[in-house]
Image (cartoon, coloured by chain):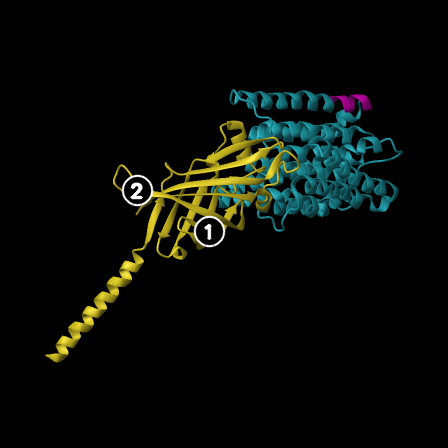
Amino acid sequence: MSVILESALTAGLAALAAGVFWLLGWRLRRAHALLSALGVSVGFAVLYWRVQGRPDFPPIDATQWVFWHALLALPLGWLAGIAPAYRWLWVWGALLGVLWLFVPPLRPLVESGFWSLTAGVAYIVGFALATWLLMALTAPLGEEGGLATPFLIALLGGVSAGVLFYGAKSASLAQLSGTLGAVVGVGVPLAFLRSFTIGRGAVALAMLLFMSLWTTALGFAQLTLGQLVVLYLLALTPALRLLPAMQRLSPAVRFALPLAIVLVVGGAAVGMTYSAYMAQSGDTYSY
Amino acid sequence: MRKQTRFVAYLSILAMLVGSLQSTQAQAVTYRVDPVHSFIIFRVKHLNTGFAYGRFNTFSGTMVVDERNPANSSIELEIDANSVDTGNSQRDDHLRNPDFFNTRQFPKITFKSTRVRKINDTTVEVQGNLTMRGVTRPITARVTYTGKGRNQRGQEIIGFETTFTIRRSQFNINYGLNGGLADEVRVTFAVEGIRQ
């Protein structure tokens, strides 16, 4: 089977898994919070398994934690879904949960001496807080109907794939990131169903998984902190739609503005990493 | 007087015994791997078409060689995974990252022999544990003696060579298995050791 066909099949299977859970959540409103997160969780797990093979538990290789984050963070996605009713449970549960999730994958960098203990603690706490903030700020987007939210997150997956491919020089992390975007992107056609929303849990969990991929790329591949910050800000961009000033604008403008930012800034980020990649040496290497 | 003579005789026998033990131990000679005159080369099939070659430039190790009783021989090797060199800096960066060796978490590749068995006068079978990317797997290789001599400094040197094949998927290196890069990697280790 060709590589392209294989990738398409992987993305299709992952998207199908997510779509099935979201359709169930659309029909079973009482279970929507859980099914929303479950769609991303199972979709990403299917995707990872096909791209990287069966991971160990507990992982010997720290990069395999990305897979386990998809499953272990499921309660956080569910908490995001019930956040309006249980705000404090969500705030503290998510914060402690994210801190707990980020320690195992990044600890080997301290153990191998790549990071000092101080730097390691600072990175882990910093990433956990940033992830928690990203989840908290973007989760309400999942309650919005229409295709804007899944489309913008899918686009973020594409930009992230480009930066990880040329910047971090990791084809597999790029593939995971791009296909995570495709998993959330299945919400675009589903958005045409009446009163369909992908849910707060799906958005929160997708953001956590993006951060998991980016921190893995920073720690173990060659993503720079600057590139990670750009990707992080792009991930926050869809949340602009929730600002009171934006709420007063027409739906088209509320969609077009973050879209333009992601396209322009994301396009520039991919373009710059591509240029740096090509300028690294006179030769070409196409993986 | 007779007691004294007997004591001297015992001492002489003891001295002979110790001497013979020392000469037996002297058969096992320790050599340090000479990184300048040793090579670790690998090849893997690319897109089911051509072979891509690479090498590791930095490694160290010791060999204990017992010519009379090869079973007493052993080898330990430590390779700096960051020193991978395929003649293309972008590909080398890719090999260092989590798609392949994940060198920030696993900067070393190690081999430690567990058993050496004589096959014939110039060949031994070496069994040992290869650890790569945090995974340890037993491997077996036929090692051929390639020569012995002295270097320009007058030090005694010895040479061996082996070629064996591993499956990279057994070490959790799964990138590109679906047609991009073959699972089988052929490794050639040509070593020259300097007597310690």
Report the residue marked by disc 1.
B125
Is residue B124 rendered magenta in the image?
no
Q: Residue at x 78, y 21 (%)?
A: A253
Q: Earlier in the sequence, mark 2 or mark 1?
A: 1
Is B165 placed above or below A182 here?
below
User: Mark 1 — on which chain does it sit?
Assistant: B
Magenta stretch bounds: A251-257
Question: How far across and how far down the image is residue A245, in percent?
Answer: 75, 25
Kindly give the residue lying farthest to the front in the view shown: B120
Q: Identify the element where label 1 is drawn.
A: strand
Q: Is residue A18 visible?
A: yes
Neighbourhood count class around disc 1 (C-alpha, 10 Å): few under 14, some 14–19, many 20 upward: some
Left or right, B192 with reference to A4: left
- Which quarter of the rendering shows the N terminus of chain B? bottom left
Question: How far across and how far down the image is residue B115, in percent?
Answer: 45, 55
- Name the foreground residue: A283 vs A277: A283
Left or right, A23 with reference to B36: right
Report the residue marked by disc 2.
B149
Q: Residue at x 80, y 24 (%)?
A: A248
